[in-house]
Amino acid sequence: MGADGGGSAAEVGGGRSGEFSRKRRRTPRSDWQFPLLTDWGLRPEQQRLLVIIASVVAALAGMGGLVAAVRSLGTYSPERQASAAVIGPDTALPHVFRGWGSPKLFDPVTDRAKDERALTEKEVFGQSEFSVSKKLKLKLVAKKLDTDCSAALWGASLLEQTSDAGCTQAARGLYASSDGRYVGQYTLLNLKDGKSAADLVESLKTLYRGGWTRPLESPKAAFPAGGYSEAGGYALGHYVGLVWLGRVDGAEPGPKDDYVSLTLALRGAEKAVYRRVVSITGPSS
């Protein structure tokens, strides 16, 4: 009985062990089995490889579509860069610009309706030279007064803004230093009112690289293409004065280059506006 019982237990145990062994040897159903692909005779590993390949192809196609969509939107570039590209990389234009609002002194000429008389070339550039120091002077080598401001300026945004501002005159004077080291240009714009002048100076603080005054030509002085130069804008009632200075060799200023004194001397052309203020308010002002 005990032997039979022992034998029965072994048989039973052996049967269960075999059953468990058979269960462990069963291959679980793969997650990569798709009825359609199985019907095509593809094994699970082949189905998995096919799905991975299809996913990669779809991702690449989607990326290509994304790139195409982004390109269709265009690329962003500041207006000053787009405009500058039109005139070429070697165009002479300032690397630094600073702007100032109109002092109260020029309030009498804030409205052009009270200062209707047009500027004259002699009025603005009647003085042929300005003193920078005892030994250094700025000498006028070229001058021009345009009644079409677009002839003196470039840049789509600047042309549009000055047109909206009612620009009727642009007076330009080109100067060479007596030592042959510097070149400067002063430009005076005649706008309709003080707000337009202030807005123009303010906008030039960020957009001057995409719109600026055209340099006058002279064999005695020239701004070197691609050279370093500095500029400043001044609202003067309904006028805007633009000062532009640089070294003839195009180099950046060194310790001996006094651009402050050069700027003050070049602004001597603004005497024309001062005289107009006096003509309105009287000498006591």
Image (spheres, grey):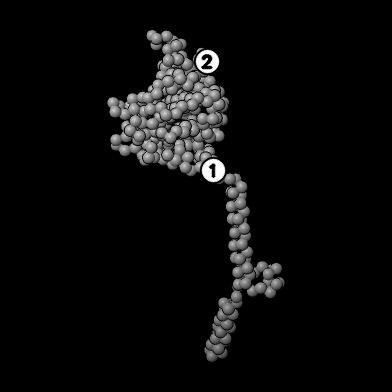
Residue 45, visible in the rendered structure: yes
Residue occupying image coordinates x 51% and y 15%: 117
Q: Number of numbered discs present?
A: 2
Residue occupying image coordinates x 53% and y 38%: 83
- Between 143 and 16, which is closer to the camera in this rendering? 143
In the rendered view of the protein, which quadrant contains the N terminus?
bottom right
Residue 114 x/y as whole percent: 51, 13
In the rendered view of the protein, which quadrant contains the C terminus?
top left
Three-letter code for the amino acid on which mark 1 is drawn: Tyr
Residue beneath disc 2: 116
Residue 133 x/y as whole percent: 30, 26
Q: Is residue 12 above or below residue 106?
A: below
Q: Is residue 36 above or below residue 88?
A: below
Marks 2/1 in contact by CB < 8 Å: the verdict is no
Three-letter code for the amino acid on which mark 2 is drawn: Glu
Residue beneath disc 1: 76
The quarter of the displayed image where residue 142 is located? top left
Q: First in sequence: mark 2 or mark 1? A: 1
- Between 131 and 24, which is closer to the camera in this rendering? 131
Residue occupying image coordinates x 42% and y 15%: 275
Residue occupying image coordinates x 66% and y 68%: 34
Q: Secondary structure at mark 2?
A: loop
Residue 191 x/y as whole percent: 52, 22
The quarter of the displayed image where residue 167 is located? top right
